[in-house]
Image: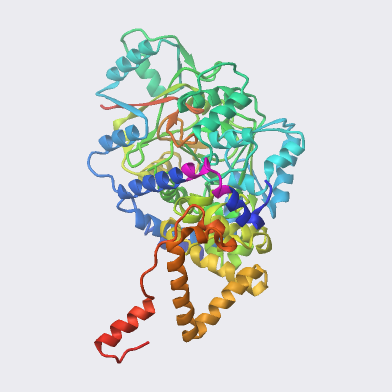
Amino acid sequence: MQHTSEHFVQNSRIALADAQLKPVLGAVTTFLPALRQKAIDQTPEFEALRDYAVAMKDHVLDHLETYLADFERAVQARGGAVHHAAGAEDLNRIVLALCAGADVRKVIKGKSMVGEETNLNDALQGAGLEVLETDLGEYIIQQAGEPPSHIIGPALHKSKAQVAELFRQKHDLGERNLDDVPQMVREARQMLRERFLSADAGITGANALVAENGSIMLVTNEGNGDLCSILPRLHIVIAGIEKLVPTVEDASALHRVLCRSATGQITSAYTTFYSGPRRAEEPDGPVAFHVILLDNGRRAMRAGKYRSMLRCIRCGACLNHCPVYRHVGGHAYGWVYPGPMGSVLTPLMTGLERAVELPNACTACGRCEETCPMRIPLPEHLRQLRDDAATAGITPRAWRLGIGAAMTAFRWPWLYRASSGLARSAVAFLGRHPGVLRRVPVLRGWAQGRALPAPQAETFMGRWQRRQHGKSGEHRL
Amino acid sequence: MNARDSAYAALAATRPRVHVPGNVVEHFITRLRAQGGQCSRVDDEPGGRAWIAALAREDGSSMLTAKDAWLERILALPGPALPVLRAAGEGPVKGLAITTAIAAVAETGSLLLHPRAGTPMALNFLCDRLVVLVRAADVLPNLEDLWARVRREFGSDTPRALSLVSGPSSSGDIGMQFATGVHGPIELHALIVSG
């Protein structure tokens, strides 16, 4: 997908002006947190489950290379093969070579964020292969020619009416009723079934890689990932190296926090552990099983201060609880990963210069860290990235000037008091005359769609001083 | 034991379990139903035979069956006529299919399915209605019990695929509205056989 993170502010303006997007985002960021909370309320052990998941993942990161070696040996022992990809292009090249070697023409895919990360579909199509996304949300956006807007629900930005219209355009099925969701779902089932049966290769991601037995855990509600793993003669698994867990019990431990945090489910409809190609006595399954492990900046992340980002299990809870995501949606972030986790991962994976605005897309409310099942200190990582940007001198000039002015005011208490008093008067005036605010060039955009609240009659400092003076007069600031 | 494995052993000892209150089988039924699955319970194998015959009559199509000694024994019991049975692996998978689970998990309302000779994995994902038989004694409290069972049953030679099926194929991708039968079974029915 096209990388437009450097235009986050501009992308956000477009998103904020999209009248259709606003109610959809409002619904997503209300409905999914409510489902999550309900599932957590049913699980008294949830905090203990989180603690274990974090400790287990940290343990794996401490011993990553030996667990990787165990996993590779176990896959090979079951007749599969493991490949290592340093970067996005390496992964795409390995996939293409495997497809060429097996005379593949038709590829079906399960949802994979790693595939999005490496722009795999473009690479496959560029080589003349036919590629079909099979997760319903991914299928919808592939048909629409759009990138995903949410890591769990890639098409959540689209309304029911927009999906119905898209199906009418893309499916040559004549006049039919597409008024409700079950009808659209049946139509997608009908369109995809034949493609599943005729595919040569299936490409899926993995929610966990199990070191002890070389299996991959695949989590879906639709069963599309399983069909991609079972029906074609070649199964290729693509996954980041951080997906490793020691045992199947640990995969289940992660699964418990993943499902509750992502969709508010106690479990997914399908959770399957696959290892190796079909055995002689089995009537179906792939004849070849390959796992490609992607680094793409992960080892560098592990070695530095952003190591805890490798705990991320791609549940999307931080997106659903982020006030910035709630207003601008996923496309504004301009790359594969949106929301708070995306604002950390995008600069780390694609370069801070290209995504310097993202770490600033934060109100510092802390809800992302509160809800992250893996307790990733996202606000702290965003602050560290802002710090990195300032150190590297790549923070936009206007922001530098503003922060410089604020620092000067904070350094001189009399200046801070004088400027906050002036600001209070200005805000009071503008609050009483909303039309004025909408005519000020810098503030025009901000003032559209929201009213300025009337401020208190005096500043906090003024009030504090007055109260202290009234008490004893000894503790004046 | 090396340093890594010692550290892991200490960590694994702290792994929390999810408590399953009350009757395990009742909990399983409640969980599976909450996830869109259906569940019935019969007292014995002849009861299971009668239940399958009634479902097949209602469905009206031929029935695809997994190759499983327990299932074959139940189907061979005397009782009302069954529709044409087709062994899985012979022709396309569609319509009503029936298989067995080696275990079920009350914590998640899941049935554990795996491929065997004569029982393709596609059976579980391509049919329209999937019926899964499981013994009441094989309904385990939680996932840790399931993995202990798998280790006991298979040792280190675990099946190539182990699938925890916990509801019908479903999606909320369009308008966040729950809909079933996206790719896999539109209906999932667990039949718990006691006795």
Q: Position of residue B39 (x, y in %)?
A: 32, 27
Q: Residue at x 55, y 32 (%)?
A: A162
Q: Position of residue A413 (x, y in %)?
A: 47, 85
Is residue B98 in the magenta section? no
Front residue of B149/A331: it is A331
Give the side of residue A25 with respect to residue A115, left or right.
left
> How is the protein colored in the picture?
rainbow
Position of A29 relative to A435 (above/below): above
Front residue of A254/A315: it is A315
Q: Is residue A121 visible?
A: yes
Q: Is residue A313 visible?
A: no
Position of A13 relative to A395 (above/below): above
Determine which quarter of the picture holds residue A192. top right
Q: How many marks?
A: 0
Determine which quarter of the picture holds residue B56. top left
Give the side of residue B104 with respect to residue A219, left or right.
left
Position of A307 relative to A279 (above/below): below
Quarter of the picture containing the C terminus of chain A is bottom left
Q: Residue furthest top?
A: B81
Q: Which residues are magenta?
A: A15-25
Position of B51 relative to A26 (above/below): above
Front residue of A433/A64: it is A433
Q: Position of residue B37 (x, y in %)?
A: 36, 30
Give the side of residue A284 with respect to residue A85, left or right.
left
Q: Residue furthest bottom?
A: A474
Instruction: From the image, give the main secondary structure of the stretch colored magenta.
Output: helix
Q: Position of residue A450 (x, y in %)?
A: 46, 55
